[in-house]
Image: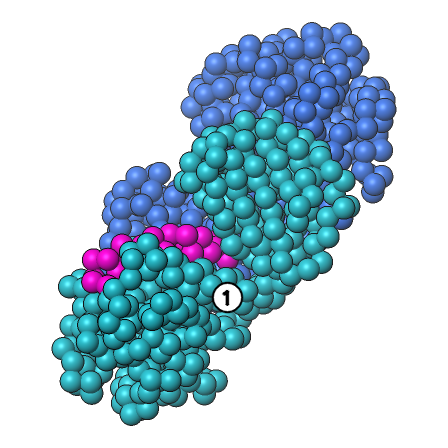
Chain colours: A blue, B cyan
Amino acid sequence: MSVTLPQGFSAAGTTAGLKASGRPDVAVVANLGPSQAAAAVFTTNRVFAAPVKWSREAVADGQLAAVVLNSGGANACTGAAGYADSVATASRLADRLGAVVDNIAVCSTGLIGVRLPMDKLLPGVDAACDSLSTDGGAGAAEAIMTTDTVSKQAGVTVDGWSVGGMAKGAGMLAPGLATMLVVLTTDAVVDAAALDGALRRACRVSFDRADSDGCMSTNDTVILMSSGASGVTPEPAAFVDALTDVCVDLARQLIADAEGASHEISIDVVGAASERDAEVVGREIARSNLFKCAIFGGDPNWGRVLSAIGVTDAAFDADDLDVSFNGVKVCRGGQIGEDRSLVDLSGRQVRVTVDLHAGSDSATILTNDLTYDYVKENAEYST
Amino acid sequence: MSVTLPQGFSAAGTTAGLKASGRPDVAVVANLGPSQAAAAVFTTNRVFAAPVKWSREAVADGQLAAVVLNSGGANACTGAAGYADSVATASRLADRLGAVVDNIAVCSTGLIGVRLPMDKLLPGVDAACDSLSTDGGAGAAEAIMTTDTVSKQAGVTVDGWSVGGMAKGAGMLAPGLATMLVVLTTDAVVDAAALDGALRRACRVSFDRADSDGCMSTNDTVILMSSGASGVTPEPAAFVDALTDVCVDLARQLIADAEGASHEISIDVVGAASERDAEVVGREIARSNLFKCAIFGGDPNWGRVLSAIGVTDAAFDADDLDVSFNGVKVCRGGQIGEDRSLVDLSGRQVRVTVDLHAGSDSATILTNDLTYDYVKENAEYST
């Protein structure tokens, strides 16, 4: 159930001393082959970190030998010197693995605007290489945590091949990609172009729809590597399905552990004229601070849902909107529906269903409530 | 310093019993003429309240005799019956004033999805009419408060004519218009078309740039009425200037009293390729929960500013961005600038300056921090 579930991968996590907490902070995931096919998606933020710039170039040819990841510093907004740090990190790992530097991806997470202490990071890369193992997935997953309270791993096995993955991210979790680093592995035989297509399809309905706090990071990276070690070439659809399952599983784990959250909210938008409309409506609701505070307060405040829907350009008639909280349709036809006191929001899981009555498409956005603890964590994070 | 500062207006506030608190909840502002020229702008939310629907029609001919406003219920998402309530409210005031019902605007504020208790509201309208007075502005301003802690009034006098105004709004303060009701009055001689143009210009740089929590209301209304009682026809530019001054004053009062806020934040975006770019960048920063939490925590977290800028389509190069907090340029050229410990965010006023280095246009967005008290107020508002 990790990046080392598929055959042909080794991984490790180690403590380089980048974090004040003294917890593990450097991870390596290496592809032992025979294939080195790879694909990746990155943040669409125009302010992006040095490792994102480097890794985009590294994966452009569809080949990766390994990924090195660090927590304890995002290496974003650090200029040419920061970029050189990412190159130096890749070089060190390439040297240790006997790989080409252009086949090494680099991921960083932590505070923006702080240089990485290379005198600690590079020895950390060495130490991780020394402990690489085919059951090192759990250690790697632990080493990429920032404000995460638990490590995130997932995996599925299908007819002789597997997909595994790990993720980190608990804040700055937003559109496009949640603020997160994700490494996905497979031993299925899939070429780089097919990996790329499958990854984009899987992300679109998983990480892209996890929107905890509306803030898009400078460092989001999702990397997918195939070792081909199973020797099995899966049906394309079966591969997409398995990959999507792993991504959805990881996305749910991210939302479940989002900073300070007391509720995990699934916003199901149905009856939409297009999938895009459903997504736009779900995301607008997910970003309404008033809605998020209401859930925290146990209040099925459908007025705040309607006022969020109303600022979108989705197809709907305000007099047709239905809104349910945990199955109780408190708003019917844009007006007062069932008694709101019938809604129980005391559990951690909340399901909000919006029927636009404008078509047959749908989408689900995952989000969290807005709590005292969210404010506390994010008011104190860098100080 | 209120809606009754200009000649030719009477106003009153009264307690009809719409609020559990027993505080004043119905206000009337009447135009005594000789002119009844008027203009208004409304929420652009596609889910809009019954009084907005009514008042849009009422002001369409550029004439208003009076406005009746209630707190204690938004009359939004209340269907045909709710619309009938707005019409009945206008009718009652028209009867009492001897005015045409189509010249009466109606504004409501409070919870969405709850019918107004008309058996209390209509007697409240009568009572307000009984106490209309040419110094009743302060009472009217008090009667439209919801979670406001202070009433908001403003006014300027220029060469024999005046502009006055009152506003309410402390939450759901967002784009386009902040969640608010505003009534503006003038005794200058200005026709309806000129009032409309002046009002749109003034709103664009005042209420439209006050964005406390990113949530757009269903009820936002800004009404401007001219009595022409001064007999003075001002220069158009002088009128726009005076009106803008009053609107900016009221917008600042709204932000100063926003729910739970501990900081009033002015985001000045300069060096933009267009005023629109400056506004887009300022608004994106104003809506970043991470940025808002950082300010609450006294943390000049410029990384969160850059990551917000990066999701916009404004013209800029990430390597050219400068960000200052209270005058200390903590980010220069997209990288670490002055020592962040030089920034003092302990005061209530915070000024964030972003230089895009992409042109010569600028805009200022006003917003607030995200605090425990914001969450508390909005988690408990309707329960």
Q: How packed is label 1: few (under 14 Cα within 10 Å), some, or many (20 or more)?
A: many
Judge from the rendering whether residue A335 lies leftward or rightward of residue B329; answer left or right.
left
Which of the two residues, A199 or B75, is positioned nearer the viewer here? B75
Residue at image position (51%, 12%) is A191
Which of the two residues, A300 or B175, is positioned nearer the viewer here? B175
- Give the residue number, with chain letter if any, for mark 1: B253
How many badges with numbers are in the image? 1
Residue at image position (57%, 40%) is B354
Was residue B213 drawn as part of the magenta stretch in this picture?
yes
Give residue B305's position: percent from left, percent from top. 59, 41
Which of the two residues, B37 or A53, is positioned nearer the viewer here? B37
Give residue B374's position: percent from left, percent from top. 57, 64
The residue tagged with tag 1: helix, strand or loop? Answer: helix
Which of the two residues, A298 or B214, is positioned nearer the viewer here? B214
Rendered position, A358 above or below A344: above
Residue at image position (25%, 64%) is B233
Q: What residue type is labelled 1?
A: Gln
Residue A265 visible in this rendered orientation of the protein: no
Judge from the rendering whether residue A361 lies leftward or rightward of residue A88; answer left or right.
left
Residue B94 visible in this rendered orientation of the protein: yes
Rendered position, A377 above or below B87: above
Chain where mark 1 sits: B
Rendered position, B219 above or below B316: below
Give residue B307's position: percent from left, percent from top. 58, 37
Was residue B221 drawn as part of the magenta stretch in this picture?
no
Judge from the rendering whether residue B337 lies leftward or rightward of residue B122; answer left or right.
right
Judge from the rendering whether residue B192 lies leftward or rightward of residue B7; answer left or right.
left
Give residue B181's position: percent from left, percent from top. 37, 68
Q: Quadrant of the N terminus of chain B?
A: bottom left
Residue at image position (38%, 57%) is B241
Q: What stretch is highlighted in magenta?
A: B190-217
Rendered position, A192 above or below A336: above
